[in-house]
Image: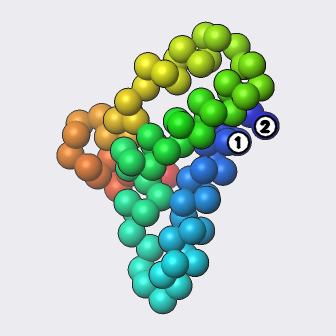
Amino acid sequence: MSRRSLDDATHSELHHGCLEEHPDEAMPWEAWGGVAAERFRLSCQMEVLVAIAGPQHEIDHLAAQTGTHCDVDADGDDYKARDW
């Protein structure tokens, strides 16, 4: 599994977990996106890389991440500003 696949899988896990817990409610973006979700995703990637003895440069890169890359201007709505 690539890091990108693991990234997508963890976002999907968060999204579907929220759907199961709140099936009749609107899905808030914060349930699967944002800084908290990015930190969860990073911890999952780190766990896998360490478990499989992944390349040290990738482990170092993940260890340096804070999860804030999803909100570059710190206003909490970068996802909503995307045009795709």
- Please state which of residues 82 and 24 is positioned toward the viewer in this rendering: 24
Residue type for callout 1: Ser
Q: Is residue 78 visible to us here?
A: yes
Asked if disc 1 and disc 2 are in contact, CB closer than 8 Å, the reply is yes
Q: Secondary structure at mark 1?
A: helix
Dot 2 corresponds to which residue? 1
The answer to whether one can see residue 83 in this image is no
Q: Is residue 58 above or below residue 38?
A: above
Q: Quadrant of residue 45?
A: top right
Label 2 packing within 10 angstroms: few (<14), some (14-19), many (20+): few
Q: What residue do we see at 20% from left, 46% from top?
A: 75
Q: Nearer the viewer, residue 51 or 42?
A: 51
x and y percentages locating residue 37 in the rendered image: 45, 49
Q: Is 70 positioned to the left or the right of 10 in the image?
A: left
Residue hosting label 1: 5
Task: From the viewer's perspective, tell me whether residue 76 is left or right of residue 51.
Answer: left
Q: Is residue 67 positioned above or below 26 on the image? A: above
x and y, in percent, of residue 30 in the image: 37, 60
**C-alpha separation, residue under disc 1 versus residue under disc 2:** 6 Å
The residue positioned farthest toward the top in the image shown: 57
| Labels in figure, total | 2
Label 2 secondary element: loop
For the point 35% across and 56% down, the residue is 80
Residue at 49% x, 52% y is: 84
Q: Callout 2, which amino acid?
A: Met
Left or right: where 83 falls relative to 10: left
Task: Name which quarter of the figure residue 39 lies in.
Answer: top left
